[in-house]
């Protein structure tokens, strides 16, 4: 059974974990379209010790009422259960990240593999929310479109 996963960080095309999505040994993953989450959420950059890259984007589960809305841009993929298991392992679901239902709006023209969808369609999907949130995380700057090239080590 296929799942639709919205990615906003290191799994996007051109980012360091995208190779997991393209490795056929991990299962099936097909890009549907670029998109954005319907609801605003904060994405913050947090330091990560002991990893190749010293930082990671984290999607926090709630938008603080006293902060300006943050639109999260990313990519929507269809994945099979094998790929979903690989992504769950990467994200340490449900411990470090928790995969939850949400919706996204397609901002690009969907792949021909998905003729039932059009630019502007609202699509049910799942996304990995950071599951070890502390109040101070909401004090970090929010970003809308993660690109590792924009982040200084």
Image: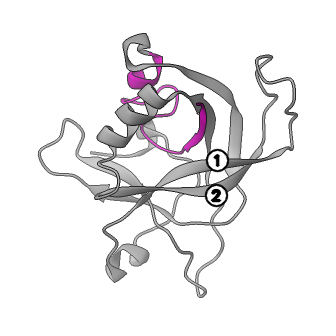
Left or right of residue 80: residue 113: right
Q: Is residue 9 magenta?
A: yes
Relative to residue 108, is residue 57 depicted above or below? below
Magenta highlight range: 1-22
Q: Quadrant of residue 114?
A: top right
Give 115 or 51, whichever is nearer the viewer.
115
The residue closer to the viewer here, 140 or 100, is 100
Mark 1 closeness class: few <14, some 14–19, many ≥20 residues within 10 Å: some
Q: Which residue is mark 1?
A: 125
Residue carrying label 2 = 102
Name the residue: 41% across, 57% down: 98
Coloured how?
one colour
Disc 2 is placed on an element classified as strand
Indicate the position of residue 103 as horizontal and vertical percent values: 70, 54
Q: Viewed as shown, does residue 48 lie left or right of 86? A: left
State the SS at label 1.
strand
The label number, if any, that marks residue 96 in the structure image: none
Q: Is residue 56 left or right of residue 51?
A: right
- Does the residue at mark 1 contact the one at mark 2 (Cβ under 8 Å)? yes
Disc 1 or 2, which lies upstream in sequence? 2
Residue at x 45%, y 35% (from the top left corner): 84
Residue 48 versus residue 3 in the image, above or below:
below
- Residue 100 lies, with reference to residue 53, above or below; the image says below
Picture quarter with the C terminus = top left
Which quadrant: the N terminus? Answer: top right
The CA distance from mark 1 to mark 2 is: 6 Å
């Amino acid at each position: 059974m296929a799942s639709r996963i919205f990615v906003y960080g290191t799994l996007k095309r051109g980012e360091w974990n995208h190779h997991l999505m393209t490795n056929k040994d991990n299962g099936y993953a097909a890009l549907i379209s670029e998109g954005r989450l319907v609801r605003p959420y904060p994405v913050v950059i947090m330091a990560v010790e002991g990893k190749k890259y010293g930082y990671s984007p984290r999607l926090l589960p709630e938008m603080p009422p006293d902060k300006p809305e943050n639109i999260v841009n990313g990519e929507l993929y269809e994945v099979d259960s094998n790929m979903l298991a690989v992504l769950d392992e990467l994200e340490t679901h449900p411990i470090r990240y928790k995969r939850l239902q949400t919706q996204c709006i397609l901002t690009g023209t969907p792949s021909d593999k998905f003729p039932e969808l059009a630019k502007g369609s609202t699509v049910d999907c799942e996304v990995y929310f950071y599951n070890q949130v502390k109040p101070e995380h909401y004090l970090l700057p929010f970003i809308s479109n993660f690109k590792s090239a924009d982040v200084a080590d």
